[in-house]
Amino acid sequence: MLQLSKEDLVKAYTQMRTIRDFEERVHDEFAGGEIPGFVHLYAGEEASAVGVCMNLNDKDNIASTHRGHGHCIAKGCDVKGMMQEIYGRSGGLCGGKGGSMHIADLSKGMMGANGIVGGGPPLICGAALTAKTLGTGAVAVAFVGDGGSNQGTTLESYNLAKVWNLPAIFVVEDNGYAESTASAWSVGGGSQVKRAEAFGMEGFEVDGHDFFAVYEAARDVIAKARDGGGPSLLHVKLNRYFGHFEGDAMTYRGDGEVDGLRQKRDSLVIFRERVAETGLLESAELDEIDKSVAGLVDEAVSESVAAPPPTREDLTTDVYVSY
Amino acid sequence: MSGAAIQAITMPKWGLAMEEGKVSAWMAEEGAAIAGGDEILEIETTKITNVFESPVAGVLRRRVVGEGETVPVGALIGVAAGADTPDAEIEAFITDFQANFVVEASDAAAAPEPEMITVAGRQLSHLVMGPEDAPPVILVHGFGGDTESWLFTQPVLAEDHRVFALDLPGHGRSEKTGAALDVAGMAALLADYLDAVAGSAAHIVGHSLGGAIALKLALDQPAKVKRLTLLSPAGLGAEVNIDYIDGFVQAERRKEIKTLLQQLVADPSLVSRDMVDKVQKYKRLDGTTAALRALAEAVFPGGRQALVMKDKLAELSVPVQIVWGSDDAIVPPSHGDGLPASVTLHRFDKVGHLPHMEASGDVNRLIAG
Amino acid sequence: MPKKSFRQAINEALAMEMRRDPTVILMGEDVAGGMGAAGEDDAWGGPLGVTKGLMPEFGRDRILDTPISESAFIGAAAGAAATGLRPVAELMFVDFLGVCLDQIYNQAGKFRYMFGGKAVTPLVVRTMYGAGFRAASQHSQCLYPVFTHMPGLKVVIPSSAYEAKGLLTQAIRDDDPVIFFEHKVMYDDEEEVPDEAYTIPFGEANLTREGDDVTIVAIGRMVQFANQVADKLEGEGIGCTVVDPRTTSPLDEETIIECVEETGRLVIVDEASPRCNIATDISALVSEQAFSALKAPIRMVTPPHTPVPFAAELEDLYIPSPERIEEAVRSVMGAQA
């Protein structure tokens, strides 16, 4: 924690707050009928995306999941462009052609949210191979859920990353549920770390509500990968505040489960407590960040509502580079 | 003609790759009197369709191969004899010929093959035919052409000449890299090539842009040139069909190429599918388009010929003949007007920009003569 | 010009592009072979020796043997393509697409559209297809219609050695994902292939024969059969134009329509299963755009709607034969076989 500058801490908190506000607002707007399609929210998991991505630069690539907004923000995607994308506007990051599940910005090393569970791990093996082949020193990170951890693509990717000795990191974000199915039931053997070890990788279990724990664990495995030390895995245990998708009544969750989490396991609250202990950031400075983030999200929504949709001409462009 | 011996008319071999030919049309009826050199049929090869001049004189007694039929090189396609030679003797001749006819094995080892040669640091491809001690002839193709432009010429001349055909840089199998040369640069390279392959001054035959290059060589280094034959040459006027040139540089698709090639000849049906195919294959090679574009810019800047040498023709002391098709759509036939008396001009009606293909018999005789 | 086999043509295109562009890499199961084993290195060069010799020249950093994990390595190829390499991934048999289709069509094929035109994915997947090898149901299929159906992918099916080198070179230089089909019984077929690099553009059909009476559109290996039939019938005065589309996506609709308008009769030969294959697609195209030019119903020559059988007698019956093509041509000419 002491290795982080004040500037870094401000950045980390700003991103976490942005994710939280963004998702809470999308939740409200979706409920109001403003947002079309399938939307999966990341609120509650902020410390994972930000704790990992604080160790990355634009040359490093990440692949995300259907629950991708947090990873996008943490990797530096433009927040207003994201919101417009979620609204299906031509000014969105993907011109309104991708939507919530396919937000990407390759210039920031964000290889896309992904509508296919387990879609990302093979892709980041490729990004890691590019880094290794071209000697760029970059790494690649796959975020995958506890559901995705059971896909063959993920397990094959562990093996490929190991046998090719790729600068790849697999971050299993275990929020306890694959859709409505508990990971306590669906993950055979229970431990993602043991799975990593079975493939000859190092694996670490991390408290995903604690930014600093995630940051430090990610820092070590990323440094090792950059050094040619090969792939590793982080099993990040965390919780989501909302349903699998917006509209999920969450009848599978226990009574008061989410309320309890919001009170006791809020990564933003935990972060504020930790920085207050060190005296590096005053509470007032953090309040200022909260305000400025709220303003940004407000603007993102109002601009998205007013922005024009794509046109008929956009329907058939961007399928091929040339055809 | 009575009493003339029975003579076989057989499928000719035009070019190295020709293994068979199709009789696309007969131009003489059975019973017609034919003289040597008469156009008696059209033969379609994989490269081009060409008229076939009778190698024999007499009465055409039998068309052995019907229109539309394809037979191997050397096969009997017709029989000439005297008008009074009995039919039975004609039949016996045919039976005997067919019984003894053996398809010439496609003997790649024996046939001359193009070879690579380094000239002034450039990798060039060339094809050499004919007896080593025979007088040298050098064939220089035009823009976008190659050694195969001479497929009706080189084998015929090679009977009593040492005939060298080269691919200019950017053409055929020669290098597609390196800076583009203008006409003077090409002429200097041609001089180096001549020094490398021929022991003495040579008869230079140039077609189109190759004609300008040959002429420039004769003006700059007259000692290297014994005789000059220019076919539809560039270098005698400023105009050139630049739309054709630009089109050829850019063309990729079969239809574009076919339309362009048809502009080269008076009779568009002469352009065969394989001729189009061959040009398309050449155009696909890495570097071809860039090389042709650079060459076009060097020799036809602004759409006009950069080098006009008409007023210098009179300076030449070697024999010069110029051949032009009246229907040439690429280099205006009017560039052949007002030549000095020392230059002989031969014009051919119903011939376009490729007299050595469209009137190969006549042109071959002019070159050999 | 030197004669080379279909196998050599492909090997040469790979080698030349790898020399030309250091971002071109090759990956697949046993593309070199012998990885980690005690014996010979470059032991296989692919199961049929197509990539033999590349590893000694380019090294194991660019010729990557993979575990048998198509999902992971085809996906890795997609990810590498989106991040700066030009990977050529070998899917040994196209029948294995069942274990890696997601990476091809949901990922690589859609990046560009989903990401609003910002992604470039220069991926080539080389794959063996086709019956005639007595390789039975799971190693013999012609699955190019599956990929042709999917926007974002380009589908290339070369019909000869010359075509293979030029089309593969184009595929590697192309900025879109390309599925490149190699018919396993064609590897030893020889023809003249230039030593130089050259490209054949996608979306321009080749006319391998020209005639006035019947248009035969044939795919991949079937082009050879169609040529045989055209040559035979020419002697009888039936002129056939043989159209080799070369690529089914993009498809040169214009040439097909033009040829049908010139001949008025159409036979389509496709080794793929008959429902929703290229023959049905072209038939629909011609029915819609050139119906009035047709002098006879369109004939499709395809296998039956069955898996590819093993027994030689059955497999020979399964594959469209020159005899069946000839019968179809005669039938559209109005004559009995």
Image (cartoon, rainbow, N blue to C red):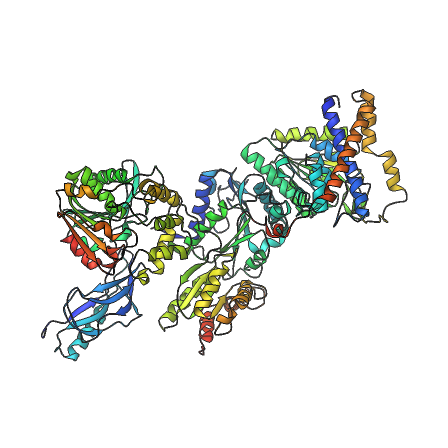
Instruction: Pinpoint residue C317: horizontal percent, then vertical percent.
Output: 51, 69
Instruction: Pinpoint residue A201: horizontal percent, then vertical percent.
Output: 67, 36
Instruction: Pinpoint residue A279: horizontal percent, then vertical percent.
Output: 81, 20
Residue C47 versus residue A141 in the image, above or below: below
Instruction: Pinpoint residue A225: horizontal percent, then vertical percent.
Output: 63, 31
Q: Nearer the viewer, residue A284 or A1?
A: A284
Can residue B64 be seen here? The reply is yes
As drawn, which residue projects farthest toward the right? A255
Q: Nearer the viewer, residue A7 or A297?
A: A297
Residue B70 versus residue B333 in the image, above or below: below
- Image quarter for residue B356? bottom left
Can residue C56 be seen here? The reply is no
Q: In the displayed structure, does residue C62 sit left or right of residue B32? A: right
As drawn, which residue projects farthest toward the top? A279
- Image quarter for residue C322? bottom left
Q: In the displayed structure, does residue B338 sit left or right of residue B20? A: left
As drawn, which residue projects farthest toward the front? B338
Q: Quadrant of the N terminus of chain B?
A: bottom left
Q: Nearer the viewer, residue A36 or C328?
A: A36
- Image quarter for residue C146? bottom right
Q: Residue at x 24, y 67 (%)?
A: B41
Count of numbered marks = 0
Residue A316 versus residue C323 in the image, above or below: above
